[in-house]
Image (cartoon, rainbow, N blue to C red):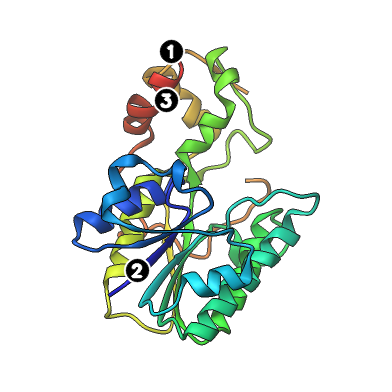
């Protein structure tokens, strides 16, 4: 069984590669620059250098496979939704021409709204296109990544957590390694079919005030500073809850970054 994995150097993909190799698989990884891969995984994977917006390249790279993990990476440009549209064309053409049986798509909480959620609207486009592509597809609607905090590292060093969202609105927050664990299970299993929506909500919903309090204990003292009343389609449940807490993640990843 050949599994193809996109964005193997990403926040989720880097964990997913390891999990698949540990499960005895030899995944094929699609990467723009092979030199960016962790040297420790190179011997356990097959590497194809390809730009995911290159439709012909993606079709060639996904021949004779059983399952595909697809991520819409940020591709730049003036119109982000145009980038998502190009990525969507690549994956749907590959699914159809190569008759790929199963696709696991890294989507986001909010994609179910279809419109009005910024760049998440682009993920909704990919979801809908995969639904019509003729494959079994599992959409992983992920919560807010803990690693997004690292994009604001300079402010965090100064003890400030910045956000444009309501300070008191609880949101699902999740560790990327927990998303990878859910993805690995879906990719390795052959017992599901059709269209599946699997939310990945992390261990608990947190407001930005909650996050500030956790980070104050785990990393640095800081002062805390979703839009609207949106509620995810998938309620928090045993199946959507993952184990890694923000405090545990911050101790392992955020504290070293702040030094």
Image vertical order of residue 34 relative to residue 107, above or below = above
What is the x, y in percent for residue 106? 49, 60
* Residue position for label 2: 3
Quadrant (top left, top right, bottom left, bottom right) of the C terminus: top left
Q: Are marks 2 and 3 in contact (CB under 8 Å)?
A: no
Q: Nearer the viewer, residue 207 or 20?
A: 20
- Residue hosting label 3: 254
Residue drawn at (62%, 71%), measured in percent from left and top?
55
State whether residue 225 appears in this view: yes
Q: Earlier in the sequence, mark 2 or mark 1?
A: 2
- From the viewer's perspective, is the residue at label 2 or at label 1 nearer? 2
The tag earlier along the polypeptide, 1 or 3, is 3
46 sits to left or right of 110: left
Q: CA distance from mark 2 to mark 1?
A: 38 Å
Q: Residues within 10 Å of mark 3 (few under 14, many from 20)?
A: many
- Rounded to the nearest whole Å, what is the CA distance between mark 1 and mark 3? 9 Å
Look at discs 2 and 3 and give the one toward the viewer: 2
In the figure, residue 218 lies in which quadrant? Answer: top left
Quadrant for the N terminus in the image: bottom left
- 85 and 206: which is toward the camera: 85
Query: Quick check: 189 left or right of 113?
Result: left
Pinpoint residue 233: horizontal percent, then vertical percent: 52, 65
Q: Which residue is mark 1?
A: 259
Quarter where residue 197 is shown: bottom left
């Amino acid at each position: 069984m050949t599994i193809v994995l996109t964005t193997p150097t990403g926040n989720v993909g880097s964990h997913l590669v390891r999990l698949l190799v540990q499960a005895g698989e030899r995944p094929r990884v699609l990467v723009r620059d092979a030199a960016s891969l962790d040297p420790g995984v190179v011997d356990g994977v097959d590497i194809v250098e390809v730009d995911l917006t290159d439709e012909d390249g993606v079709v060639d790279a996904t021949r004779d496979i059983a399952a595909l993990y697809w991520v819409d990476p940020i591709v730049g440009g003036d119109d982000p939704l145009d980038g998502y549209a190009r990525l969507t064309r690549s994956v749907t053409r590959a699914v159809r021409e190569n008759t790929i049986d199963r696709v696991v798509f890294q989507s986001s909480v909010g994609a179910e709204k279809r419109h009005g959620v910024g760049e998440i609207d682009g993920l909704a486009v990919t979801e809908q296109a995969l639904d019509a592509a003729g494959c079994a597809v599992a959409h992983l609607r992920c919560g807010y990544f803990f690693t997004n905090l690292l994009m604001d590292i300079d402010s965090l060093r100064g003890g400030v957590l910045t956000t444009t969202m309501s300070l008191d609105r609880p949101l699902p927050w999740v560790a990327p390694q927990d998303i990878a664990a859910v993805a690995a299970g879906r990719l390795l299993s052959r017992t599901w079919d059709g269209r599946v929506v699997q939310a990945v909500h992390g261990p608990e919903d947190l407001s930005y005030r909650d996050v500030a309090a956790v980070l104050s204990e785990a990393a640095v003292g800081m002062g805390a500073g979703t839009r609207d009343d949106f509620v995810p389609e998938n309620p928090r449940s045993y199946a959507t809850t993952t184990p890694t807490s923000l405090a545990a993640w911050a101790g392992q990843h955020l504290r070293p970054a702040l030094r």
